[in-house]
Image (spheres, rainbow, N blue to C red):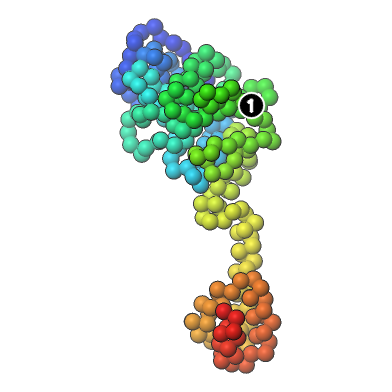
Amino acid sequence: MLNKRQYHTGGPFRADQLHSGDPYELDDGHPIECLPSGGRHAKANLSGGLALETDPDVTAAGFDTGFTPDEKNLRAPDIAVGNVPDEPGWVSGAPPLAVEYADVGQDEPDLQAKIRTLLEAGTRYVWVVRLTGVRRVEVYEPHASPSLAYPGQELEAPGILANPVPVEALYDPDAAHETALRNLLQRRGYPDLDAVREEGREEGKLAIVLHLLRRAVGPIPENDSQRIRQLDRDGLAALAEALLDFHATSDLAAWLKRHV
């Protein structure tokens, strides 16, 4: 949420009286003007969004998405994870995970009111990232006392996020990039960057073995080539040693018959 807010005495208003782009939220029908944020807030917001949106279990996330749990309330978390449809207009209900950034000028009573509204509407976790003083994240859950997490610690949101989130990833670009890389690799079936490197090494070994086989026996039948690609690391190593005695494709076929 934007840092500084001003309450207006008009109203009460309904959420359907506001439109996308209006600089207001509603708290029990009372409009709250939301003013632009500073550079630190904006950069942190972008980092956190990257780290969260790329999580393998996240199918929808958004910035400043307007949620209407009822006609008198309209709240837009800085980052919403879950329940962000690709459609125009306000979103009914609340996001499972909401992230707020609190910087200089933060209106604390409004922030606490917003947290209550979101939790009462069904949000399971509200993370408040404090950018002033010691960096920290306040974790709010329904029917529980708030808890704190500091740099070096991780945050979890079971059922919403697949992976824990380092506190630093919510505001530091380098940490956010590392977290996003891990998440994107997992979306492609790799547990981490080391697995990608290992696959590259294995592909390199396979290419060398195939090259040596062609030198030893000539063109390799496609069926045999596919069977070679099914070999695990130990099998490929065994074939690399055995091929030194091959003189024809029949030698390769016989070896594959015994080992694959």
How crowded is the residue under tag 1: few (<14 C-alpha within 10 Å), some, or many (20+)? some
- Which residue is found at the position 44% from the left and 31% from the top? 95
Would you place residue 180 above or below residue 120 in this image? Answer: below
Residue that sits furthest to the top in the current view: 9
- Residue 79 position within the rendered picture, expressed as x and y whole percent measured from the top left: 49, 31
Q: How many marks?
A: 1
Residue that sits furthest to the front in the current view: 143
Would you place residue 226 above or below residue 196 in this image? Answer: below
Q: Tell me if 193 is positioned left or right of 50 in this view.
A: right
- Which residue is found at the position 61% from the left and 71% from the top? 232
Residue that sits furthest to the left in the current view: 17
> Which quadrant is the C terminus positioned in?
bottom right
Please tell me whether mark 1 sits on a helix, a strand or a loop.
strand
Would you place residue 151 above or below residue 189 in this image? Answer: above
- Which residue is found at the position 60% from the left and 81% from the top? 259
- Residue 7 position within the rendered picture, expressed as x and y whole percent measured from the top left: 44, 10
- Which quadrant of the figure has residue 108? top right
Kind of residue indicated by mark 1: Leu
Q: Which residue is mark 1?
A: 148
From where the camera sits, is residue 100 visible? no
From where the camera sits, is residue 139 visible? yes
- Which residue is found at the position 33% from the left and 36% from the top? 87
Would you place residue 184 above or below residue 81 in this image? Answer: below
- Residue 90 position within the rendered picture, expressed as x and y whole percent measured from the top left: 35, 28
Frontmost residue, 121 versus 63: 121
Frontmost residue, 107 versus 146: 146
- Residue 74 position within the rendered picture, expressed as x and y whole percent measured from the top left: 39, 21
Q: Tell me if 209 is positioned left or right of 162 in this view.
A: right
Q: Tell me if 77 is positioned left or right of 13 in this view.
A: right
